Amino acid sequence: MAERQPLKTDFRQRKRISVNGIVQGVGFRPFVFNLAKTLGLTGTVTNTASGVAIEAEGSGVLLDRFITSLEEDSPPLSIITKIEQEIIPANGEPSFSILPSKSTTKVATLISPDVTVCNDCLHEVFDPADRRYLYPFINCTNCGPRFTIINSIPYDRPFTSMADFKMCSACQSEYDNPSDRRFHAQPNACPECGPHVRLTSETGKYLPTEDPIEQAASLLKTGHCIAIKGLGGFHLAVDATNESAVQKLRQRKHREEKPLALMMKDLNTVRHYANISKEEEEDLLSIQHPIVLLIRKNDKVIASNVAPGNDRLGVMLPYTPLHHVLFHYDLPPLVMTSANLSEEPICIENSEAFNRLKGIADYFLIHNRDIYLRSDDSITIHLADKKRIIRKSRGFVPRPVIVNSTGPPILAVGGELKNTVCLLKDNLAFLSQHIGDLENLESYTFFQKTIDHFQQIFETKPEMIVHDLHPGYLSTQWANEQGPPLFAVQHHHAHLAACMAEHQLSKPVIGLIMDGTGYGTDGSIWGGEVLIGDYSGFNRFAHFEPLPLPGGDAAIKAPWRTAVSYLQTTFDHLPTLPFLDEHDFNPVVEMVTKNINSPQTSSCGRLFDAVASMCGGRQTIRYEGQAAIEFMQAADHLNHPPFEFSISKKTKPVIMMIAPILHSIVKAIENDEPFSRLAGRFHKTLVNLFHDICLLAKKETGINTVVLSGGVFQNPLLFETLILGLRRSRFTVFTHEQVPTNDGGIALGQALVGRQHLKEALCV
Ligand code: ZN
Ligand code: ZN
Ligand code: FE
């Protein structure tokens, strides 16, 4: 039977398709070009102000397939936020071509994060016949540096730190060829024309060597500490199987016990040292290549001082070609820690590194491609079946969080510790990379630079600056210096809003915010809060019983002080517990009873500290959260009975009482219950208490949605068990996935709350 000939007009259609999102500088036009060729479509593709514009012509079926493929098979670095299409008259164009960018229109496009070297490039780097054999700066449109080398927009070579390197003719022809993997790859380079590495002594003197990377590898093997310039900054590297090399690094860096991150050659090596799930494996291999916190195996090979007293190892795989070439020389797992003194930002410039790392690094492996913006390694952990971001930096930034709010642009300046800032533009929230602790002058400078840079690369002038309610935070003071319009957001309200924002929630929720410390609306220190609210505002439904924190910060560093204070306040006489033998506690008792420098706090983090300490755990800490982490790891299981607890409904807000818990704990300690059981029972107590308080909140408000936020939810045992319990009681539970649950995420919440306020103010 003869096929029915389609009418000519049916057969040939032309569509104008506009694609928005991260679609420039990520190989999107070559992808479109090749896709169109494969499907036999004709037409054009070009960059526009808002993304990419395509005109495609062919049969309706193929055009549909083309559009589906645009979404489903787009290049790894691209993010499509919107595709629009319309039918236009077919014009019988004979071929498909890439048109030059419309330079008259200003390009407002999204910038890609830095991306791990791709497999195609790796293949070339280890191919002795390739012209980039062992060349540590190989990259293509699918991989390589982006965010950290961009000085200004548009994302074109003259505005990157590759500006000084003029492409050789071989590189240029790749760059100009639409069917080449390096078509418009801005950092494209080769050994002829690109950057180079050099090895220097500790004073910055060049060491003549044929192969600086091979030489660095052999120095690492003999126990030396090498500062290695990477993508977003310098690392300090030592052999992770060499205890004395690790110890030397710790002493020099003034980092006593905080776990150090590791880099391992490949997935097989990681499997040797840690138990990894399929999801963790995918995460290690993702385009971000973060540090993943993995449950360690009982090996004897990784030096015990890499992560003392910790059941997890922070591990990443090599992510730049330089790392791969380094590991090519048969290196053991390496400690790869940010090159800085404790809590300072990571070094990025060669001269800065020689200066700041004097006396820390034995040698420097440097190169001449500048880093414009610092970016630490990102850190993730897999909990409750999902990837959680503990530190959001390299690979993730500046990928936006898409929110369900539009309105005026807002700048939110975050908290004080683990600071990040957030620029909210339309429905895109650009959370900055990890900036760090602002008390540190270098971090504060970095904070200001990041704010300027974000406003520039996203071409946004905020209509309002939003900051924390704490008047003493340096971020608050900076905001005040900028002048109005300003808006202050309570710390835990920001936590609640951040979790709402990333899940695009808009109706009021129950916010279970379990945190270290944050400034309350009554001037006291909050931190164990149940808030009912949304972006517009909140009601403090419940909180932990406030107790005195003797000496403020001093108590944070010495949990035993908090333990003494909490016990002294709860009991008529300080119960004689074994942990007290170690301390001169009378001055603390006096501070508490006379109310000297002992602010009241409802902090959940401090409760953890106090209980861990009185049960015989950490008395003083060497890094944030250490007492709680070790207490959590000691817990054997949660099948024990909880300690007694109660919720006092007499007052508004409702109070989650601590006194009955402490009475019950003291009894258990007097009965010689082992530390592991005490730890298990305490976790069980909090799980039950939080569950009950959510039920109460639901009963009084009718709200069934719970958001969890705050640093305490980095505790895997508490977090996972609580989620299970809440879900069993049919709560809809939302937790952080795109931004950290710690203070690294609050700028997102601040921004949304600020915008809501501004919108409401404008309506009045
Ligand atoms: Zn590549
Ligand atoms: Zn070249
Ligand atoms: Fe917080």
Image (cartoon, rainbow, N blue to C red):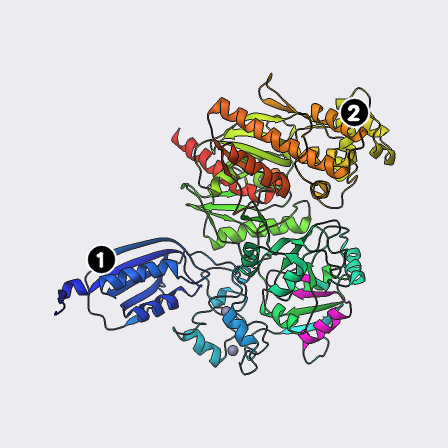
Figure quadrant of residue 43: bottom left
Q: Is mark 2 within 8 Å of ligand 3?
A: no
Q: Quadrant of the N terminus?
A: bottom left
Amino acid identity at mark 1: Ile
Amino acid type, callout 2: Gln
Between 187 and 561, the one nearer to me in the picture:
561
Instruction: Left or right? Give the position of 573 relative to 149.
Output: right
* Residue 684 visible: yes
Q: Is residue 231 magenta?
A: yes
SS assignment at label 1: strand
Which label lies toward us, 2 or 1?
A: 2
Q: Is residue 228 magenta?
A: yes
- Residue at image position (77%, 27%) is 666
Q: Position of residue 241 (x, y in %)?
A: 75, 63
User: What crowding class fits label 1: few (fewer than 14 Cα within 10 Å), some (14-19), or many (20 or more)?
Assistant: few
The C terminus lies in quadrant? top left
| Viewer-nearest residue: 452 or 679 | 679
Res. 477 visible in picture: no
Distance between the Cα atoms at labels 2 and 1?
Answer: 77 Å
Q: Position of residue 426 (x, y in %)?
A: 41, 45
Neighbourhood count class around disc 2 (C-alpha, 10 Å): few under 14, some 14–19, many 20 upward: some
Return the residue at label 2: 568
Kindly indicate whether the residue at mark 1 contacts the one at mark 2 (C-beta within 8 angstroms).
Answer: no
Q: In this rendered view, identify the residue nearer to me: 119 or 102.
A: 119
Instruction: Note whether 734 is above or below 592 in the view shown.
Output: below
- Disc 1: residue Cβ within 8 A of ligand 1's nearest atom: no
Residue on which the image places disc 1: 87
Mark 2 / mark 1, whichever is N-terminal: 1
Stretch of the chain drawn in magenta: 211-236
Task: Label 2: state its secondary structure.
Answer: helix
Instruction: Give me the residue at 72% from left, 79% from top.
Output: 208
